[in-house]
Image (cartoon, rainbow, N blue to C red):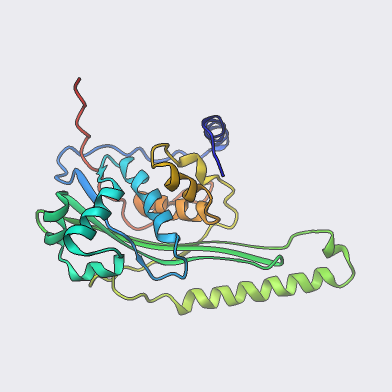
Amino acid sequence: MNLRLPAITAIFGALALSSCTTLPTVKANPSNPIRTVALMPLVNNSVDVDGPMVVRSLLAVSLEKFFYTVKPLEETDRILKEQMGVTLGSQLDMATTKMLCDNLGADGIMYGSLEDFTQKITGIYNSKRVRVRLRMDNCKTGQIVWKNGIGVKSEKSTGNSLMQKIPGWGTAVTAVGAASSVISSLSDRNDADLPKLFGEDIKAPWEDISDDSSSAEANLILGLGGKIVQKVLESPLLAEAETAIEILLNGYYDDGADLIPYGKMIPPGPVAPKVTK
């Protein structure tokens, strides 16, 4: 999908007109010693090979809104591979935070895991799920300064379609949708406990955004790079991934009417230095 600038401008305009919830203002914290953040490859515990890249790319954009300078992902990956032999997020357990900081020249390291990145389309019951956990370490002290996790799901059953008007079909569709919803709820409870993320317990409870019709594309910023932008925008789980990141970093969940506290907002970084000419 090629999303041109006029299309992005139109999406921003539509979102501004439709938004009714006042979002908290994020202010820079000049005293925060973490200015440059190296975003590590995500540990992929999902069954999707492209999911980690999609989530990581969106996260890199979102972190800049919190006054952090994110080390270019390609540069980070190159250094990890050439100097430490690391190409996957699951290999990061072989390195300490200090080793990563020394090699990457960053003030902070952000780790993450993608636990779920699935889409099930049956025509009767459609489900989309993204589950992410994140944590940030201070390079100077080695301490964890922030962590959060969430599972975002969007589930819909067939509505009043033409097939439902067929005698007996509407009842069958409703029954199948209800059964699928029950199975989904049982699954949520069964996978509540997750393995530690590099020795740290981070929960990721599920939030249902089935009624959320907002467009995640409106929050994207141009500049990620051609192939990455195209890959991210083509993801069938774009809205769920973007929503998960927004909730994690902001520490609240927007249900369309109110802001519901969720975890802890990531500490805002310092103001980026001005470029002098």
Residue 110 is drawn in which quadrant?
A: bottom left
Determine if residue 214 is in view.
yes
Front one among 224 and 256: 224
Q: Position of residue 80 (x, y in %)?
A: 22, 58
Residue shown at 17%/49% (left/top)?
106
For the C terminus, the quadrant is: top left
- Above or below — where is 12 with respect to 163? above
| 170 with respect to 255 (left or right) | right
Front one among 21 and 170: 170
Residue shown at 22%/70% (left/top)?
93
For the N terminus, the quadrant is: top right
Determine if residue 261 is in view.
no
- Above or below — where is 238 with respect to 274? below
Q: Position of residue 149 (x, y in %)?
A: 36, 62
| 198 with respect to 53 (left or right) | left
Residue 223 is drawn in which quadrant?
A: top left
Residue shown at 15%/65% (left/top)?
96
Q: Position of residue 13 (x, y in %)?
A: 55, 31
